[in-house]
Amino acid sequence: MMRTVRTHKEVLAKFTPAQREAVKRRAHELEQEEMSLGQLRKAHTFTQVRLAETLGTTQESISRIEHNSDLLLSTLRSYIEAMGGKLQLVAQFPDKPPVSIADFGSLAAGKTSPSVTASAKKAGGNRRLPLEALE
């Protein structure tokens, strides 16, 4: 049996206005879940020049950060904090709940045992675990 190929516009045309709006909202939510640094900066209405001034650097440096695929966590944290945000580092494992790594900035200061916060929804809320608990 041969299937008829339809474009997304043809499929959406059969939806009610409320259904089309729900699809549009969900698409926007998905777009917001993952952004490049440049998209994130633009979404927060910062120009490269303004962000550079906030960080005390040059526009060229901001451009390099946005196009670099291997950043130091301290650089990424500074970039996010300059826009008023807070950087969180989350580790995900196939058979365990996601964990938020706390104080990851202290790794650069030579501390060897960062704490880890379990993000699993449990009755007691978030709980701190020693790093060894993830093994």
Image: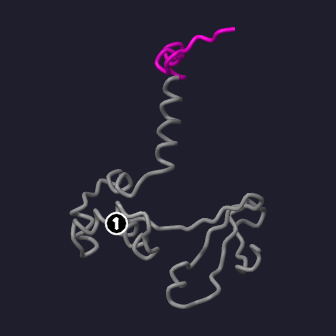
Q: Position of residue 78 (x, y in %)?
A: 38, 73
Name the one closer to the observer, 62 or 12: 62
Q: Position of residue 65 (x, y in %)?
A: 34, 66
Against 65, residue 39 (above or below) is above
Choose top left, top right, bottom left or bottom right for residue 117.
Answer: bottom right
On screen, residue 52 versus residue 110, left or right, reads left
Residue 2 among magenta residues: yes
Residue 104 among magenta residues: no
Choose top left, top right, bottom left or bottom right for residue 113.
Answer: bottom right
Q: How many marks?
A: 1
On screen, residue 82 versus residue 27, left or right, reads left
Tell me what residue is drawn at x 52 percent, y 42 percent. Answer: 30
Q: Report crowding for label 1: few under 14, some 14 to 19, many 20 or more residues within 10 A (C-alpha).
A: some
Report which residue position mark 1 lands on.
65
Name the one closer to the observer, 5 or 106: 5
Q: Position of residue 129 (x, y in %)?
A: 73, 77
Farthest top residue in view: 1
Name the one closer to the observer, 22 or 75: 75
Farthest bottom residue in view: 110
Q: Which residues are magenta?
A: 1-19
Check disc 1 and give the amino acid type.
Ile
Judged from the image, the secondary structure of the residue bearing numbered disc 1 is helix
Farthest front residue in view: 1
Against 45, residue 15 (above or below) is above
Quadrant housing the C terminus:
bottom right
Q: Position of residue 18 (x, y in %)?
A: 52, 22
Choose top left, top right, bottom left or bottom right for residue 19.
Answer: top right
Q: How does the figure colour the protein chain or chains?
A: one colour
Tell me what residue is drawn at x 69 percent, y 8 percent. Answer: 1
